[in-house]
Image (cartoon, rainbow, N blue to C red):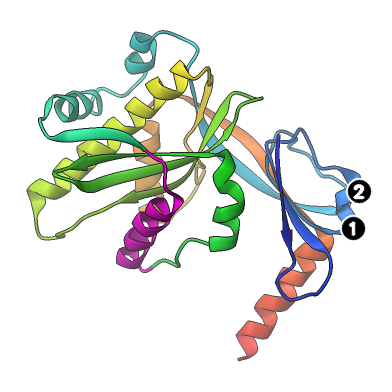
Amino acid sequence: MLRFEFPLQRLPFGKATHTWFAEQPDPADAWGFAIYYQAKSTGPVRGFAREQKHTKFISLLGTEDDIFDQIGKNTKPKIKRALSEGGLRFSTIENPEEVRDLYNEFARGKGRPPLDERTFRAYWPKMLATKISADGDALVMHAFLVDEGLKRANHLYSASLFRSTDDGDRRSLIGRANRALHYLNMLSFKDRGIVTYDLGGYALGTQDPELQEVNEFKDSFGGQLVEESNYVSLPLHWARKVSRLLRGRK
């Protein structure tokens, strides 16, 4: 279990807490501003609003061949091609600013909000980030929240950096590099003793075409669909509702 504390942004006292991978929420947190992400419990908990959460687990317990064998037949050749292509370099990212900048560049291209700096800075000591580069430019980046005790790596942030949306060959290269980066991450985490590679969420039953495409991508690596829970303490749950209501009136 990982636990992070933040000072409340708009109040001179108190704190907010983020807890990851707990069995279930601590009842004492029901009175504060607390979020439990991907808790193992799937039932209601007094004092918390439950949000159903699904994700895909890839087991790293077997051999390298076992890990590769569970990958889909259409994805395997793309990984093999990426690994055989000259000029692609796999590396770990040591500088949090690089992760932030790569993610924010990707987010701008997608019309998404930038990375939340406060959360990212708090999480960083428990994170590991990797990338694949070509000719000195990052093509793809993945960042994970790692629980050494549970031997679990959770895919938290990613960026696929399409320098030219009109360059079909480069887009294909980046797509292959993204798949290869997941596979290389699995092998790297296996060497570190991690046994569960969490693909970072799964939009079960979605009708959104973009999310369906993401689901198909994650399905291509095999693995097991797992139900977990996000729990939000009721004070935070209602504070969020009030905040959204006030924003809607502006």
Picture layout, residue 111 above or below residue 16: below
Q: Are the residues flagged by discs 2 and 1 in contact, CB closer than 8 Å?
A: yes
| Most distant residue in the front direction | 95
Instruction: Examine the image and state in which quarter residue 217 appears.
Output: top left
Q: Is residue 108 magenta?
A: yes
Give the residues drawn in magenta, as a range. 93-111
Q: Nearer the viewer, residue 20 or 137?
A: 137
Q: Nearer the viewer, residue 115 or 99?
A: 99
The kind of secondary structure element at disc 1 is helix
Q: Residue at x 60, y 91 (%)?
A: 250
Q: Residue at x 35, y 32 (%)?
A: 182
Counting from the top left corner in percent of width and height, residue 117 is at: 53, 62
The amino acid on which the numbered mark 1 sits, given as a three-letter code, is: Trp
Counting from the top left corner in percent of width and height, residue 35 is at: 73, 52
| Left or right of residue 231, residue 64 in this image | left
10 Å crowding of disc 1: few (<14), some (14-19), many (20+)? few
Give the spatial CA distance, label 2 vs label 1: 6 Å
The kind of secondary structure element at disc 2 is helix
10 Å crowding of disc 2: few (<14), some (14-19), many (20+)? few
| Left or right of residue 60, residue 78 in this image | left
Counting from the top left corner in percent of width and height, residue 113 is at: 45, 67
| Left or right of residue 150, residue 188 in this image | left
The amino acid on which the numbered mark 2 sits, given as a three-letter code, is: Ala
Residue behind mark 1: 31
| Left or right of residue 39, residue 204 in this image | left
Residue behind mark 2: 28
Q: Is residue 142 magenta?
A: no
Instruction: Examine the image and state in which quarter residue 148 appears.
Output: top right
Secondary structure of the magenta portion, mostly?
helix
Q: If the image is split into quadrants, where does the N terminus sit?
A: top right
